[in-house]
Structure formats: C-alpha cells, structure tokens
Image: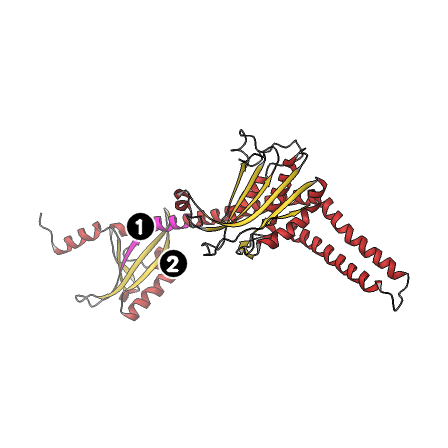
Amino acid sequence: MNLGNVDIIEAVMDNLPVGVFVKDASDDFRFVVWNKKQEEITQMSAATALGKTDEQLFSKEAAELFRSIDEDVLNSGKLKKIPQESIRTKAGKRYLRTLKLPMNDPTTGRILLVGISEDITESVETQKELERLSERFNATSRELQETQNQLFQAEKLDSIGRLAAGVAHEVKNPLAMLLLGVDYLDGGIAEDDPNIPVILKQMREGVTRADSIVRGLVDFSSQSAIERKKTRIRDVFNSTLLLVKHELVRANVKLRLGIADGLPSVYLDVPKFEQVLINLILNAIQASGEQKKKEITITAQTERLKNVDPDEGARTLRTFRENDLVVVVRIQDNGTGIDPDNIDKIFDPFFTTKATGEGTGLGLSITRKIIELHDGKLQLKNRTDEVTGTIAEITLPTRLGNTANIKSPKSKTEDSD
C-alpha cells in the first residue's frame, strides 16, 4: 500500500517510544500534534488534547510552569532540556524528562514549539524507594549504634558496682591522711615546728591520690561514642590498675606486670579500653578461684604477625596482614581454665557459667566488640604450659589503617603484690 508523506510521518510519530507534542505558539500555545505515546503517558486522547492549551488540560501550577518554559525556549531560540517535570493523570502522578525546541513552519509561517517527553516514572520511583530504604537503613544503624553504646554502658556499670567498694577503700586512705593533718594543724602551729612541711606534703599527696582515683572512676563511667586517640598503653594500665587494686588485694592475687619499654602508641578510646582491661582482669581474679597461690600476669609487647589467614584480608580493609607490627596484650591467670565444651561459646551473647545473678553473660561479647571497634582482635584460650589457667590475648594495630615500622623492644617484668 502506497502511503503519502503525511501518512508516513503520522505512522512514524505514532510508533515512537517517546511522547511527541507540538504547540502553535502563534495561537496561545494550543496543541496541534499529539502522538500515541503522548496519549499513553498523559492518559488523554489526541481528540481531547488537540486544540487545547496547557491551562485547559493540566493543573494551574503545572500549566504556569509549562508556559514559563515554553516562552523561555522561544525567547532563546534554542533547545532546552527539562531533566524532570511531573503531571497528574488518571493513573496517578507521572514524571517526565522533556526536550523542547522552537521551529518555524515555512508553509504557514506559524511559530511552533516541539516537545519530546520520555516517561521516567519508574526510575524516579525506584530512586525514591532507594532513598527511603537508605534512610531506613541509616536510622536502623543509628539505633543499633545507640543500643550498642547502651550495652557497653550497662556492662560498664556492672563493673563499677564490683569496683565501688575497692574505690571507696582506696579513697579512704588519703582522706584519713588529710584528716590527721587537719587535726594536727587544728592544735596550733608553732613557727619553728619541723613537722608542718612534712604534714602539708602528705596532705597534698593524699589530695592528689584521691583526685586521681575519683577522676579515673568518673572518666571510666562516662558514656560516649567511640573516639580513638593516640595513647601510651602504659598510661592506660596505670589508671586501670588503680581501679582494680583493691579487688586484687581482697582476693589475695599476686600481680606480675610486664610492659615493654618503648612501646609504640596505639589509637584507643581510653574509657572503653579500660572497660576491656577491667572486665578481663576481674574475670581472671574470679577464675583464680580457691587456688592457694593466685597469680595474674599481664604483659604488653610488640610482635610481627605470622601465619595470617589470607581470607581475613579479603573481608575488610581494616585487617591484619602478614608481617604487620602490632601491640599484643596478654592477661594470664592460673585458674582452672575454660571447659573444652564451652570454648566455642564464650563470646556468645548471654552465655555465662556464673551462677544466676552473678553475671549477664554480656561481658565477653561486649569486650570483643570493643576490641573490634579498635580494629583489633581478642582471643581467649587455655594455657598450654604446665600450669592450668586462661590467656586473654588482645592484638592491636599500631597505626590507624596501617602499621608502623618500629623495632620490637624487649620487655621487663615487674612484680606487684
């Protein structure tokens, strides 16, 4: 069948996958062309649209926007891209990506405005759904982070309860020293009394000691999101051991402390890392049980990693790699060790071998999580030497996201009763 030029053009227009419309700018921007795809997009037939204006077909707001764009295209005389616009149809809101360009009709002399619209409703709604899911995911992540911090704090408060008596005892001694000094001074001061400088020095030392103990407890009990800073690990041990000293004395546990000289600084959230050390030390004290000679050994030294599982490097960028320099902290007791049946369960939340009311079972789970937040690793294992007991081993990186090229120093071991 032979088709005329007009028939060919109409057949092509109606089979295009995009909406095509033409407005007569010389006649109040009335529609003169409206193809099949445009009917599908707008849910309006050509019979309805032809001869009408935007004001007669669309909402006032949409029509004003379309007219503004049309006039801008005519004034510029150039093609204009509208990345996204919307219209309301019987099938709901539709989103369009539109091109508009001016054209002169040489036959009639009319000024025409040609529009080509692509229906992008599906991609826009998909993007909006992705944004909603992303926001929901972010909200869930924030809630999980908040819950995690609350669990950290709950476990920390449990530790504070166990430490409270010891802290009170430690503070009582310097306060007694202060009281004795005040009583002495209250009796009158002679100009040539040689005891005054000694008493004032003792009082000052008592205040300083009490202040350091109270500050340590306040800092430890404070709640905050994890915030890592470059830290000397020896300083962390000094403040932690001050808080657990009474527990060690009360349980008659001998502490052997071996911190290597010249350890590189590590990046720690100090209160949270103190929480880890306190939890592990208290566990070691409890594990010592009824042993006649109770002993806990704490060491810290640098090591080069060997035999690192290659799969670990594939899981995360913040992981240990072969030959990385790390700081390794070991807390070793001479208790009964871990029952082989429980070795795979000790980090499970709420798992505990303690009697009801003596523990939540969250301690080791939270302790490991805190170490993981430091890009570190926590392992618990039974001793393999002649003495029974458990070793808690903490491995920490010596640099954020990387490791420092520092020589491993030798350690010295100190005894503390």
Quickly name the residue at label 2. Answer: 62
Amino acid type of disc 2? Ala
Local SS, label 2: helix
Residue 222: tell me if it is visible: no
Q: Which mark is first along the chain, 2 or 1? A: 1
In the rendered image, residue 55 lying in the magenta stretch gets the answer: no
Quickly name the residue at label 1. Answer: 41
User: Does residue 76 sit above or below 262 in this rendering?
Assistant: below
Q: Give the x, y percent position of residue 193.
A: 87, 65
Q: Give the x, y percent position of residue 101.
A: 26, 64
348, 191: nearer the viewer: 191
Residue farthest to the left, as pictured: 2
Q: Distance between the Cα atoms at labels 1 and 2?
A: 15 Å
Local SS, label 1: helix
Q: Residue at x 64, y 50 (%)?
A: 240
143, 189: nearer the viewer: 189
Amino acid type of disc 1? Ile
Q: Give the x, y percent position of residue 325.
A: 46, 52
Residue farthest to the right, as pictured: 187
